[in-house]
Structures are given as C-alpha cells and as structure tokens.
Amino acid sequence: MSERVAAAGLDHLPRGRFLAFAILCLIAAVLFEDSLSLAGAAPDFTVIVLAEPALPEVVRIAAEAARWGEARLVLVVGTGEPVPAGLPPDAVVFEAPEADPDGAFASLVGGFAAALDGGTDPGDAFRSSIVADGWTAAPDD
C-alpha cells in the first residue's frame, strides 16, 4: 500500500477498481467451481450486493452469478436511475439518496443484506434493518 493511500485511509481507495476486482473474483469462483477445492467445499454465497454504480455488464454478471448460486441480488441504483433489465425476479433494488453524510442509508443496506445472509425473510430483514437504524414509518395523511 502506498504511503499516500495509507495516509488517506481506505475510504479514498479507487472504488471502481475494487468493485471490478471483487466481480472478477466472483466470476472466477463461478467459472472454476469444479477446480476449486477448499476442503471439498464449493464456493458458497447467499447474497450479492452491488452498492456502487455499476456498468450494465457488471450488473448482468452479478445477476447471472446470483441465479447460478441461488443467491439473492441486492442492487443499489443512483437517485433517479432506472432499474436495470434482466435482474432475477427475487432481486431487491434500493434507490440511493443523493447524499448519505451520516451513513444511515449504507447501514440500512448493510443490515438488510446481513439479515438476508443469515436466512431472514426479505420482509422481516427490511423491517429489522430499519428499526435497528432508527428509521420510523411516515405518518398517515
């Protein structure tokens, strides 16, 4: 790690490169499942989260990996961005706010994904993540 990156902290690493690397690792795990041997276990994942704006090709690959691994895809799209076509029917799509200065939205998505990974039903996972982060329902008009 360069001194400049170390001084700036991990928040300043180029996210696009990390995301590309993570997707490539996922693709390798999917393509080379038979060749991988980790004590006889194949790669196992239950949730794939794309939380950064991603190219359509990356979204397509993540959707295919979710289908292949029978995993849930959680996708975060930018404010006002359309939902990409070709997602698995059980995919969950969040629309990111324009800004998340206190990290509340990121915490919500992370808590939701963690609950899904733990086997919680999506509706219950969402309800538990909003309560854990202090969100409340909007009052009825």
Image (cartoon, rainbow, N blue to C red):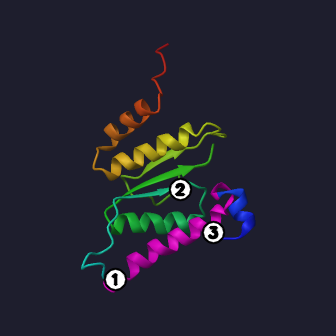
Amino acid carrying label 3: it is Arg
Depicted 87 relative to depicted 138: above or below: below
The secondary element bearing badge 1 is classed as loop
Between 108 and 141, the residue placed more toward the observer is 108
Amino acid carrying label 1: it is Leu
Cα gap from disc 1 to disc 3, whole angstroms: 24 Å
Residue 84, numbered circle: 2
Q: Is residue 28 magenta?
A: yes
Mark 2 and mark 1 lie on one chain; the one further toward the N terminus is 1
Residue 18, numbered circle: none
Question: How many residues crowd around disc 2 within 10 Å: few (fewer than 14), some, or many (20 or more)?
Answer: few
Amino acid carrying label 2: it is Pro
Q: Nearer the viewer, mark 3 or mark 2?
A: 3
Between 1 and 114, the residue placed more toward the observer is 1
Q: Is residue 18 magenta?
A: yes
* The N terminus, quarter of image: bottom right
**Lateral position of residue 58 relative to residue 111, left or right:** right
Q: Identify the magenta region.
A: 10-35
Cα gap from disc 2 to disc 1, whole angstroms: 31 Å
Residue at numbered disc 1: 36
**Residue 72: x, y in percent?**
37, 56
**Residue 133: x, y in percent?**
47, 33
The residue lying at 42 percent from left, 68 percent from top is 64
Question: How many residues crowd around disc 3 within 10 Å: few (fewer than 14), some, or many (20 or more)?
Answer: few
Q: How many marks?
A: 3
Depicted 27 relative to depicted 138: above or below: below
Q: Residue furthest bottom?
A: 35
**Residue 125: x, y in percent?**
35, 40
Residue at numbered disc 3: 17
Depicted 39 relative to depicted 139: above or below: below
